[in-house]
Image (tube, grey):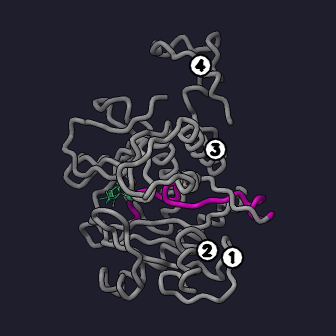
Amino acid sequence: MEPLTNTDLELPLLHKGKVREMYKYEEDKILMVATDRISAFDVVFGEGVPYKGMVLSTLSKFWFEKTKHILPNHMISTEMPESLPKEIRGRGMIVKKAKPLGIEVIVRGYITGSAFKDYQKNGSVCGIALPEGLENGDKFPEPLFTPSTKAKEGHDINISEAQAEKEVGEEKLRLIKEKAIELYKFGHDYLLGRGLILADTKFEFGELPDGSLILIDEVMTPDSSRYWPKDEYDKGNLVSLDKQYLRNYLETLDWPKTYPPPILPPEVIGNVSRLYLDVYEKITGEKFPTEEREKEETGPAEQEPSEPAQEEAEPEAKGQEQA
Ligand SMILES: Nc1ncnc2c1ncn2[C@@H]1O[C@H](COP(=O)(O)OP(=O)(O)OP(=O)(O)O)[C@@H](O)[C@H]1O
Ligand SMILES: [Mg+2]
């Protein structure tokens, strides 16, 4: 499938993020479209990753449904009106328009990534003191709540809870912290049952006009989370099934992590695409219906005669089997 890196809908564009495009749908509703763009270290790459946007959108829907008893969220529907182009099906979501809070929060159950670097340097993570001797991947006794400011441009900046309190107020921060940790624990326990460890994940919250707090953006996707296979973890290996794979690849390059981005080789793009599809399947227990799979499963002889005529199919890319 050709990746979709940009959309141009006949609706007012409210915001073009690194990955998602937000259109005004109705006064209080937004049409959020997850493109196949990928970013790392806050730099957006020129290439798109096939199926990525669909995986992010479908996984977010999955989690929004599963976690709404913990906190209501912005999702209204993933049914796209006929009037909009087909290309946004599977990647579009109509959501409640919220006022995003000035902070994002990461809940970390395990020490790794920037938190581990911070710990090695300072003996603490985002100002939270920790015992000596922690190794990359170790589990915290209790999940850590680490807020950051949502920078308009460039990198988000980690802030202390006291600073976050100044941003959103004491009472709201207490609620956000409680809900974020509960959401993380829910996701972590659910994924353990599917053989995965949710090492950390980022949440965004927003406020509705009545002042109530809701979960917005995306939830526990491979863009916003780190997951590791549990069997490998138990053997002492941290195998990344998420965007960390790309970050690890980028660390092998001599690239200063600023624009312009390097060109991503087709193998790397293919690997990221497969990782995202695989993790979707691990999480939901269902195969993601890619074009290639649909074709394999409904061989030409079995095709429903009542189906609308399909566009001329691309020849099967047989050379692109799993590496
Ligand atoms: N329900 C909602 N109401 C209003 N804004 C939302 C809602 N859900 C998500 N958003 C915002 O839409 C944007 C989603 O786009 P994306 O995640 O691609 O952006 P980003 O690059 O991470 O962030 P930004 O564009 O703010 O730098 C984010 O800015 C997010 O805060
Ligand atoms: Mg974002």
Query: From the viewer's perspective, is 87 left or right of 242?
Result: left
Which residue is disc 4 drawn over? 316
Amino acid type shown at disc 4: Glu
Q: Residue at x 46, y 47 (%)?
A: 57
Name above or below for residue 254 compared with residue 303.
below
Circles 2 and 1, Cβ within 8 Å, touching? The answer is: yes
Which residue is disc 3 drawn over? 278
Residue 168, image x and y in percent? 31, 80
Of 62 and 133, nearer the camera is: 133
* Disc with the residue nearer the chain's start (1 vs 3): 1
Circles 2 and 3, Cβ within 8 Å, touching? The answer is: no
**Could you tell me how far apart the alpha carbons at marks 4 and 2 are, in whole angstroms?**
42 Å
Q: Residue at x 38, y 88 (%)?
A: 162
Residue 225, image x and y in percent? 54, 60
- The residues colored magenta run 215-235
Amino acid type shown at disc 3: Asp
**Could you tell me how far apart the alpha carbons at marks 4 and 3 are, in whole angstroms?**
20 Å
Q: Residue at x 48, y 62 (%)?
A: 68
**Could you tell me how far apart the alpha carbons at marks 2 and 3 are, in whole angstroms?**
24 Å
Amino acid type shown at disc 2: Ile
Query: From the viewer's perspective, is 7 left or right of 273?
Result: left
Q: Residue at x 62, y 28 (%)?
A: 320
Of 222 and 269, nearer the camera is: 269
Q: Quadrant of the C terminus?
A: top right
User: Which quarter of the frame holds ligand 2?
Assistant: bottom left
* Disc with the residue nearer the chain's start (4 vs 1): 1
Q: Residues within 10 Å of mark 1 (few under 14, many from 20)?
A: few
